[in-house]
Image: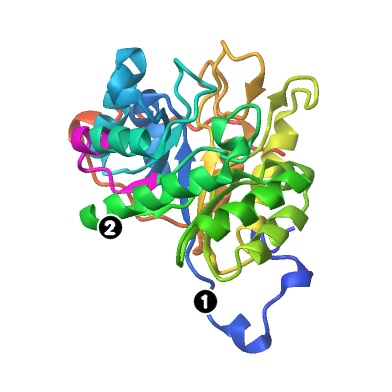
Amino acid sequence: MGLGLALAAPAAVAASPAAAQAPPPHVSVGIGDNNPDLFTDARFSATGIRHARLIVPYDVVRTGGWQLASADAWLSRARDLGVEPLVTFAHSDRRPKYLPTVRQYAARLREFRSRYPWVREYATWNEANHGGVQPTGFNPRRTARFYRELRRQCARAGCRVVAVEVLAASWKQMWRWVRKFRRRAGPGPHTWGIHNYPDANRGRFGTTQRFLRAVRKDEVWFTETGGIVRFEKRWRYDETRAARSVRHVFRLAALSPRITRVYLYNWQSDARNRRWDSGFMAADGTPRRAFFALLDALTLERFRTPPPPVVPDQLPSGPIRLGHDRDD
């Protein structure tokens, strides 16, 4: 099957004949990975991708330590390469179950923005509906107040805000959480982030389609998605399945013109993480099949990004090695 057909939208959501004549809206592609080494990999630069996502504790500037040092390195390298960072806040590592007050969240946000004034894109909270993992999971109303505070501060600074990032599953709790958050989020339009791993890795469309209906006319970003190589015992190691899932992500992105950005997680596997693996590169740096699925998608006009600026002292001294086996 040709690539254009392989990544086409499903027949159930086909456009009208008049709409089919118009070029599809552009979808910006980004990478989510907290490792600053992402920006020193010549293969990342060769993709032309100009967006990347970083997750930090909401109190990272106040608590300092290795996480602040890592954020410093990550954001500095992104800035040097001209990559636009999306910074997503999450729970404190020191007090992971603690839900801050709105005043505390606002103060920590001001500290972060003061330290990194060039950051122009933020998300209120990572997988905020994930009860038991995120302290926001049982308090959508306060999370909506966090969003309003972030939006207020960013309105003055000219930042763009993703209302919240939702783990998109078929749970009834998820839909109740989104409805309660939406009622307290204030007037729109809003930009929503979803993490639609279940659809991506099962070759489905349903949960993503339902989410699009739930947020009506608002813009939607896939702020975390991709092909799972391994996840505990539920998903046994399978690079071919992960590559197939990456291809399906781009089909999901064709469901609606309201989907305007996709962040794939993540660039390189971490050998220390025995629980999760969705890397385009193996821990030893070997490219996987999913990486070539990404490269194929980036050749399409809808997902193509402009070439990165030339940074002379970061150019590789020899040819860029992308790997050999592309059979999948």
Q: Mark 1 — residue?
A: 23
In this rendering, the answer to whether 17 lies above or below 105 is: below
Task: From the top left corner, tell me how far across and down residue 236 is, in percent.
Answer: 78, 23
- How many angstroms separate mark 1 from mark 2 (CA)? 32 Å
Answer few, some or many: residues within 10 Å of disc 1's Cα (few below 14, many 20 plus, some between 14 and 19): few
Seen at 31% across and 43% down, the residue is: 83
Residue, far bottom: 18
1 sits left or right of 306 in the view:
right
Picture quarter containing residue 238?
A: top right
**CB under 8 Å between discs 1 and 2:** no
| Residue at position x 50%, y 43% in the image | 142
Residue 170 shows in the view: no
Per the rendered image, the range of residues in magenta is 112-122
What element does badge 2 sit on?
helix
Nearest to N terminus: mark 1 or mark 2: 1
Asked if residue 116 lies in the magenta stretch, the reply is yes
> Residue 327: percent from the left, percent from the top?
69, 38
Residue 121 visible, this orientation? yes
The C terminus, quarter of image: top right
- The amino acid type, in three-letter code, at marker 1 is Pro
- Are there few (<14), some (14-19), or many (20+) residues within 10 Å of tag 2? few
Q: Vertically, is 59 above or below 66?
A: below
Mark 2 is on which residue type?
Ala
Q: Quadrant of residue 15?
A: bottom right
Coordinates of residue 62 in the picture (x, y in percent): 29, 22
Tell me which corner region of the image, top left, top right, bottom left or bottom right, holds residue 107: top left
The structure residue drawn at horizontal position 64% and vertical position 44%, both measured from the top left corner, is 246
**Circle 2 sits on which residue?**
155
What secondary structure is found at the residue carrying circle 1? Answer: loop
In the rendered image, the quadrant that contains the N terminus is bottom right
Q: Is residue 182 above or below residue 172?
A: below
